[in-house]
Image: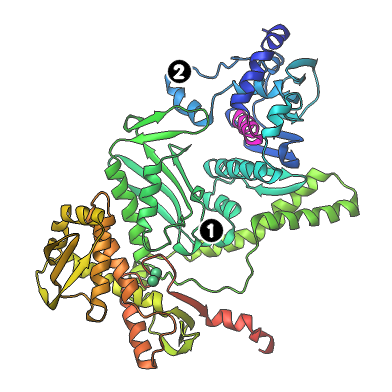
Amino acid sequence: MSKVLVMDADLANKIAAGEVVEKVVSVVKELVENSIDAGSTEIKIELIDSGVKEICVTDNGIGMDEEDAVLCFSRHATSKLKTLDDLFNIESLGFRGEALPSIASVSNTILQTYNGKTGTEVIVNGGKLESIKKNLDLPQGTKIKVKNLFYNTPVRLKYLKNLYIELANVVEYVDKMALSYPGIRFNLINNGKSILFTDGSNNLLKVISRVYGVDVARKMFTIHGTNGDYTINGYASYPEKARSNRNSITTFVNNRLIKNNELNKIITDAYHTYIPASKYPIVVLNIEVDPILIDINIHPTKMDIKFSKMDTLKELLSNIIIKELEGKNLVPNIESRTHVDKIELAVKENEKIEEIKEETNNNYSSLEELTLNFEVEEEQDDYLENALENLKTPNEIEEEKKERIKKMYPVGLVHGTYVIAENEDGMYLIDQHAAAERINYEKYLKKLGTHDNHMQDLLIPLKIELSTQEYIILKEKIDKLIELNFEIEDFGINTILVRSHPYWLPEYCLEEAIRKIIDIVISEREFDPYKFTEKVAITLACKMSIKANDHQELPALEDLLERLRNTENPFTCPHGRPTIIAYSKYELEKLFMRSMEK
Ligand code: ZN
Ligand code: ZN
């Protein structure tokens, strides 16, 4: 197999390119995964104009001999799939050996490789073998440069998204690979700006700090647990670091990146009411499991997995997260240090490099590596070390749980909405509606859970008119209301009569509360008793809680703060909004630069 086959296959490759290669990230994915397969410990991805102009991936892997260097451009050349056991690896990384010929058919591709014995360069333009150079002196590993993607297929070129989206896709992919291979040094660069750099030291928390920032890495807790079937390891963020993108949940099975909606749901459910429903925690989780217990769905772009014994996995995972959240002081602290975005940092670092480069006119890549290696790393290591030191012993965690929030003394009310409070540790702002909502939510949840059949009769029965559709649905589900201790009579012509109600409904807005509960009964399509109580509790809590602009005197505020402190989760309202924000004494001193006068 050589030239001839490559040229014959040209058309097929171009057709296949449309399927396999559609975005810059598909090219990056193929090249990076080849590098991983080659046993590399360093992978550098350099892009020009988000990769549309040029993608260059350099690794220090085993390299190829002359024959393989040519062969890898012919279709179905792959010999990597050896046994059925390999299937798991193969599938997680994509369709091996399919994409490279396709990529080469729609670009100008230069491959340079050295396998410890011989160095080879192969140039392929638009699928046509241009030149082969042998016996070159090259560094160990493989470097593949893909230039002018889709230059000969203008229709495809049109389908590339804008530069920002193409780059965002690549960053997301390389982030995930870095998280799944903390032992590999990844360096992602666009137009000379370093975007991600990991040190390959096999420290997952360090990679997390590179991907999500040091602030996030400091707000992660460890996940570690095992039962007969599963062993799980990783990190999850405290609620304050929640993201609005569900991609912040990264899961691996036996170290391979996977996607599983059920698993994501278990994780987000464990954070229920700790974060808003539209937000997601940052989680990096590896699940070790006997392959017998999983079923892999083969798909070229993603890997979906089905778990048998999902219930035991769920129990293991949610217990760890829930326990951790219950035992912690989760009040977000205002920090005077401004948050520096990863990309911003990259830009700044790059400016620094540019300066030095101008001064010394020195070799670009080595300087860049120096700067990134030493300066950024030292700073981040300090943070991480502190973060690791601050991990609590089980005893300390128990202590902390008892006194998660110290008693807070109200000082006043701002904008009729936020209580200002203080104690010896610092200053607090508390959203009075969110606080009351949390207190009422837990109260109603308890009342709904106890099946005490205490009823309160109405002096004048309440008449509720419904639409025909509502009336029909409600009649079908009337037993749900009876279970809740409502006494209800059919009054005919789409009307019902409420004669008595559960005793704990608030007297002052009784009609509204009853109406709300009936609305929920009607709107629940598939009746899930847990979801139903949950909804009723949240709705009642929101309705019955003091609103903004309700002015309260200090003793009432003090009572509110005390009751909040004694709830199960004083940190968020049932919608997941924060209730308390803290300004530590230290931060206040820093903000006012008080140390200057000391
Ligand atoms: Zn509310
Ligand atoms: Zn709320």
Q: Residue 29, percent across and down?
A: 61, 33
Q: Which mark, by number, is residue 83? A: 2
Magenta segment includes 28? yes
* Element under disc 2: loop
Q: Nearer the viewer, residue 434 or 592?
A: 434
Q: Nearer the viewer, residue 472 or 54?
A: 472
Question: Residue, x 66% and y 48% (percent of image)?
Answer: 197
Magenta residues? 22-35
Q: Is residue 133 visible?
A: no
Position of the C terminus by quadrant? bottom right
Q: Residue 12, percent across and down?
A: 64, 14
Task: Note whether 458 is above or below 395 in the view shown.
Answer: below
Q: Residue 563, percent across and down?
A: 31, 80
Q: Which residue is mark 1?
A: 217
Task: Note whether 53 is above or below 275 in the view shown.
Answer: above
Quadrant of the image where one finds ligand 2: bottom left
